[in-house]
Image (spheres, rainbow, N blue to C red):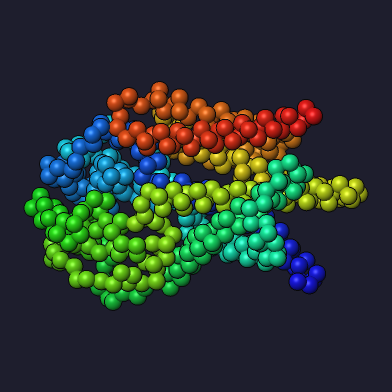
Amino acid sequence: MSPRLRTALRLFHRWIGFPAGLFLFVLCFTGSLACFSPEIQGWMQPRTALHSPLPAMTRTGLLKAGQNLKTQLDTGIFAFLKLPSPRDPVFRLWHYDGRIFLGPALAPDTGLPLTDHDVTGGTFFVTLHASLHLPNPWGQILTTTVGIGLLVTLLTGLWLQLRRFLPDLLLFRPRAASQRRWLDLHLLCGTLSLPVLFIIGLSGVVLQSQKLIHMMNPPHHPAGHASRHQAHTAIPPSLSPAIISSLTENGLRQWGTVADGFFMQTGREIGLYGPDTLHFCLQRQALTPSHPTLPPRSVCPTVHSFFVGLHNLRWAGLATRWFYCFSGLMGCIIIGSGLVLFLQSERNSITHHPVSSTIRQRLQRSHEAVTIATTLGLPLATLALFWSTRLPTPFSLSPILWEESVFFGLWSLSLLHAFIIRPATCQQLALVAVLGTGTTGLDLLTRPFHTGRPLLFGAVDLLAACLGLAALSVLLHLFRKQAA
């Protein structure tokens, strides 16, 4: 490789990687959490975990839940009824408020509301991953641009290290100099997770690009056509116990199961949509009173459905979801170590040029602040969000408003704190360590001991504790370094 090409690749890798990396860390972190969105919803609402053994869906519960759905539709709320599944064993009478899914959880055996308030839930992280909670189309534009930045940095990094790819495949020198350690960690994690991150990044870019194209060129409908939202506002569909029972029986014959399926208005009728877990590719087909059976379709009817299956994992089992989750966390390590290397390089450049301008020093300070707010502020705000769903809501506020205010408020304070106080890293690491290691105690104190699904609560508590212990380990290392 010529020196000129290597210099150009380094510039691309550094100056595309740093700004894109700030957002990519958010996408990787929230994408890892989104792999377990129903489980996070259950942790935040412990009463929906029910007793062990978990009750199965009954006809009585189904008809009562259907009656609650009809009430919502009659009052003008475009709601849908999600059926119980092993991952989320309750009815969810949800509606979408533009950011997250809201609505009561209903018992699978009785259809009665469970005594638990609305929470931001796992869909909060799904939306943060998809659009960073920005309005359309700006969220899609930003995530698409950042996704392209991921592909560029992966390819330029691979090109720069291609000669040492095999010799340094599993090389890590923990006793080397600081910058060498961070570089080894960056290259090691990048080598191990490169194929998965490239697949995730490419599929995400394709899906967001398709959304943008759809927004710019909406599909043309013939005159007189009414969308399901327009049809809903005109006349609520007929929804009797006989229709619910008939659609459920037809769904069992068609798919073998209706777990994780949902009832939702389609056109001027109510439809039962099949579970997303049945196929790798997304196939949103609905049984309706006028169409009680469905014709066979190809496994992947569209390119879009293929990339949805590749990226969203609605079909995936536990092992695949854990694999994607750990790949996302590995992406956080790659990006975090890359941000640290960038800061060290800029700091060395200023040290070797003591007559650096004030503007350059302030820019370096800004780089450090946004890096701290991204790599430490986001996990800190996430842990605080988990805590806020279990603690009482103050000042008679809406629980959703309070929880979102805690998350975004603490994240913003993390950035402000990093700008104002120089040793902000140690203080924020200490907060992450306290909240992470204390999550297990909070969980045991704020949920009934008879709650079922102990593995769900244990897994969330364990991940939070690992995050807290990792922060504590780094904090102790920094203290020892300062003492030396």
Q: In this view, does 468 lie above or below 180?
A: above
Residue 431 placed where, x, y %? 59, 30
Position of residue 48 in the picture relative to residue 74 (left or right) = right
Position of residue 76 in the picture relative to residue 481 (left or right) = left
In depth, the one of 392 and 445 nearer the eye is 445
Q: In this view, does 166 lie above or below 42?
A: below
In depth, the one of 367 and 335 nearer the eye is 335
Q: Which residue is drawn at 60% across and 48% down?
A: 333
Q: Can residue 61 be seen in this snapshot?
A: yes
Q: Which residue lies furthest to the left in this view?
A: 242
Q: Residue at x 60, y 52 (%)?
A: 189
Position of residue 384 in the picture relative to residue 15 (left or right) = left
Q: Which residue is drawn at 37% across and 66% down?
A: 305
Which quadrant is the C terminus positioned in?
top right
Q: Residue furthest top?
A: 445
Give the image quarter of residue 369. top right
Residue 227 placed where, x, y %? 28, 65
Q: Residue at x 74, y 63 (%)?
A: 11
Residue 5 placed where, x, y %? 76, 71
Q: Is residue 388 above or below residue 215?
A: above
Which quadrant is the N terminus positioned in?
bottom right
